[in-house]
Image (cartoon, grey):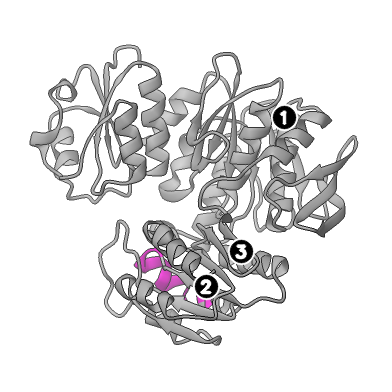
Amino acid sequence: MDNIQSIYFIGIGGIGMSNLARYFISKGKKVAGYDRTETPLTKDLVTEGAEIHYTDDIKLIPGYCKDKESTLVVYTPAVPAENEEVAYFQGNGFTIQKRAQVLGIITKSGKALCCAGTHGKTTTSSMLAHILKQSHLDCNAFLGGILKNYGSNLILSDKSEFTVVEADEYDRSFHWLHPYMALITSVDPDHLDIYGTEEEYLKSFEKFTSLIQPGGALVIKHNIKLSPKTGKDVRIYIYSMDKGDFHAQNIKIGNGEIRFDFVTPKGTIDNIQLGVPVKINIENGIGSMAMAWLNGATADELRHGMATFMGAKRRFDFLLKTDKIVMIDDYAHHPEELAASIASVKELYPDRKLTGIFQPHLYTRTRDFASEFAKSLSLLDELILLDIYPAREKPIEGVTSKIIFDKVTCPKTLCNKEELLPLLENKNDLEVLLTVGAGDIDRLLNPIKDILEQKI
């Protein structure tokens, strides 16, 4: 890295790519990149010093990024293979690396605390990073969400040996990492466009466990379908809400608060309060605190970190909270995530109608899990289902939101994004509204909130 003067990102607006861009800006490097759409995140990067364009055109690549001796090119596997800029850099002998490769290099020299899992990894890694940042241990962190406490997906420290990393299983990216300790929250099959079968998906996580460094540890969710392949001197701990080496007891839910006692292998730490008081975060908090505790965080530091954690944007994010109408936004895009998110909202508001707006993410995921999506979405009191957000994929014949819609058993409406706002303006029975999905539904959040505020 010492000889690199400029870094060019293809797909710079992605949540994982952007924290790397921020890291290199902080190191005084020239940072530029391409993404197909302008977003609040890319605008922030420009303000911070990055040069970004939104057309796939090699003429727009800054001159300082065309010297192959001093430029590193970083790309995300989500970028289409026919991207002209990728072809240009490949054809001209540039050093081109995946985001995870670069992250592996950056974190190799310290103690990387890597949080992986089909779902839950953003929240657990964010909680862990906040606990450590507020403790005597401090940390660096590369996260998959914008933490409200810091307004960023990057946390830096000039004194800590710890780096918290959200470890992404897509395209086997997490195999480039060098975990000192790892946390695995879940292994429900996903990304079958990459893995093909559940067996291959699980093998990828097993490979990830084999990368944990000697003397490190694996913290793994109770009863998940995984056989770790850790080295002999890697400790293994089990966690869950109510079982394992780390778990909760004396859980108290009420008056908008959740408190519990945290059980560790060496005793119990009482009176943990969740800063984001939803039931799903009890288990997320257990995993995060387990990792922090294993690395020396004190009881008071755990209490303070958990109580002051404000959450990550788009992770069970309360956008409106009144006696008449509540609006919650969540990134859930897998059937298990959806079921957990809906159940958490229903527990908070058992006597109020729950309406969900869901935007499916990827044609392949919709095709592979249509029945499971329908089962989870049927837990709602009413569903508004949007078109599929394609992301990196091209359409698949016969795969639309309707293959989910036809199997949903609760009251339901199928509409596109252009029809959504007029539909909501004419609805007078909205009590609790949950927006869910990993696509561009976040661009509709402010307009939706404006409509709801007019109804109060």
**Magenta-colored span:** 361-373
The residue under label 3 is 341
Which numbered disc covers residue 233?
1
Q: Residues within 10 Å of mark 1 (few under 14, many from 20)?
A: few
| Residue 380 image point, x, y percent | 59, 77
307 in the magenta segment: no
Residue at the image position 83 percent from the left and 55 percent from the top: 242
Q: Residues within 10 Å of mark 2 (few under 14, many from 20)?
A: many
Quarter of the image for the C terminus: give it.
bottom right
- For marks 2 and 3, give the CA distance: 11 Å
The residue under label 2 is 356
Q: Secondary structure at mark 3?
A: helix
Instruction: Give the amino acid type for the residue marked by disc 2 in the picture.
Output: Gly
Residue at the image position 55 percent from the left and 52 percent from the top: 315
Instruction: Give the amino acid type for the residue marked by disc 1 in the picture.
Output: Asp
366 in the magenta segment: yes
For residue 94, side relative to residue 289 (left or right): left
Q: Is residue 181 visible?
A: no
- For marks 3 and 1, give the CA distance: 37 Å
Instruction: Give the amino acid type for the residue marked by disc 3 in the picture.
Output: Ser
User: Pointers 3 and 1 in contact (CB under 8 A)?
Assistant: no
